[in-house]
Every structure is written in structure tokens, then in C-alpha cells.
Amino acid sequence: MKAVRFHEFGGPEVLKVEEVPDPTGDTLVDVTAIGLNYGETVIRRGKGRELFPWYPGPSLPVVLGSEVVGITGEGRRVMGVPRGGAYATKAVIENPIDVPDGVSDHEALALLLQGTTAVAAVKAARIQPGDRVLVEAASGGVGGLLVQLAERAGATVLAASSKGGLGYDWDDLDPVDVVFESIGGAVGKRAFELLNDGVGRMVVFGYASGEPLDVTASDIFRKGVAVMGLPRDTTPEEVFELQLKPNLGGVYRLDEIAEAHRALEARTTTGKLIARP
């Protein structure tokens, strides 16, 4: 089969299409779509351990990617997390999930990881009708779904994006009840300070700036707010039942994944990016 691998950490140019042995396992699929995520650019650069000390890091050479849609030998269209990476023409999915009829490959991948992340974040935030909710990176895959879910919960949504809307100049912004924090660094710290003292909740699920959220226990104590990660009880099946409308981004070929990484790092993308073998 063909796979995109890298043998050394570095820029997008280290990603190469190579012939490798087919994987082995019970649920082997012919891949029809591959989800692409910003976090994979961090791993490719060798920066995963810096941001996430618990992350063991890959053994080189490595095939990146954590989500695929594919067709089994019996003709089932399934999705899931592949063993051994996703950037390939074949994959083994250990716990396959049937893709519902009427859901495209692109939509399925937009709801597999991004959808479960968004639903889990909303559960953690305990949004109440009338809450003011700040969504960072609102034009992205998770951010767009968070906007939908918060609006459904009756919140007033403040959508922040470098591509429009609220932007990240918040000097005159009134306090908020909930922040969905995925950027870290200075942006995350400003968002934290916007939280309403005593009642604010911040849900953290990423560091897109490359810098972790710089908030101490003393900061949390001073403001009397809650800062939390994601609960891990959300399933793709639960997400599909909500009939969300994901923001679908660009489609790349397998041999264009390096180009997709450049776009992700330049922050010029919107919505969910995928590749097709």
C-alpha cells in the first residue's frame, strides 16, 4: 500500500509518499477519507512532548493520523481510529463504527474527533440559558460545532476568529461565563481574565499557539473560577444523533498532505480538512 511517512522531525517537506507493507488485523479497510488535524503538525515537528509531557512521542519512521473512513472486505462503510496511522491507502480499525446513511465521509470525519470534543466540552461547561460564551477559533472544526451547541443551549455566543467576527482584540469585551479555550499562550490568559469572578468556567482542549495556557492555581483561587479538561464519556454515535452541521474545509490528495500541513500551520484553513487516497 501507499502511505505518507517521515523519517526525521522537521517541516512539511519531511512527509513522503512511500510503499509500505499492508497492515494486518481483523478490520482491514480500503481507506476512502483521512482526517487531518493541527496536532499532527506538532508531532511532525517533534514538539509533542513539549506541549504534552505525557505524550510518549512516535518511533521513527511514522505514519501520522488518527481517523479514517474506509470500506471493509464485506462492503461496510466504517470509521474509527486506525492502528499504526491514518495517512495511507489501507488501515486497520480496531473498533469500527458504521457511518450512518446520508452522512458523507467528510461529514463523518468532521464529527468523529472534533464532534466528540465539542460535545464533551459543552457537557463540562454546564451552559445555562443566557450565559455569555466565548468560543476561540470559531471558524475551525471544533469551534464551529461549539457555536452551534452553545446557541442550542440558549447562550449568547461570542465567536472569536482570526478570519473575522470578534477577532482577538478583547480590551472592551464584557465578562463572560464560559470560555472554550484551544489557543493557549497570551490569548488563553486574556480569555481567562474575562471570566466572571465566582461563576466562570473555562474548558481547555488545545494549545494551537504552541504555548500552554499560563494560568496558575493562585490565578484560579483569585478569581474563584473553574478550569477543566474534557470528560471522556462522549461517543460518535451520540454526536451523530445531534444532527450537527460541521464546517467542511479543503480536500487534498494523499500526495498533497504536506501542502495541507503548511496551510494548517499558516492558520489559513477553515473547517475540517481531509485527504483522499
Image (cartoon, rainbow, N blue to C red):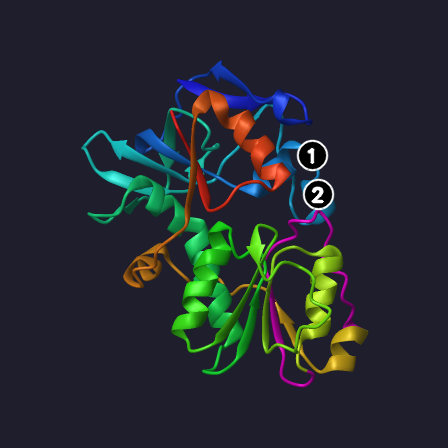
**Residue 125 as seen in the image, left or right of residue 55:** left
The reply to whether discs 2 and 1 touch (Cβ–Cβ < 8 Å) is yes
Q: Residue at 70% x, 62% y: name it.
A: 169
Evaluate whether residue 233 shows in this view: no
Above or below, comparing residue 264 to residue 88 in the picture = below
Residue 231: x, y in percent?
51, 65
Residue 185 covered by magenta stretch:
no
Q: Which residues are magenta?
A: 197-217
**Residue 93 as seen in the image, left or right of residue 157:** left
Q: Residue at 78% x, 68% y: name it.
A: 216
The answer to which image quadrant residue 266 occupies is top right
The answer to which image quadrant residue 223 occupies is bottom right
Q: Residue at 62% x, 38% y: name it.
A: 265
Instruction: Tell me the element at label 2.
Output: helix
Above or below, comparing residue 123 to residue 17 in the picture = below
Q: Quadrant of the C terminus?
A: top left
Residue 120: x, y in percent?
47, 64
Q: How crowded is the residue under tag 2: few (<14 C-alpha within 10 Å), some, or many (20+)?
A: few
Q: Quadrant of the N terminus?
A: top left
Q: Which mark is residue 49?
A: 2
> Mark 2: which amino acid?
Arg
Q: Which mark is residue 254?
A: none
Above or below, comparing residue 89 to residue 39 in the picture = above
Q: Which mark is residue 46?
A: 1
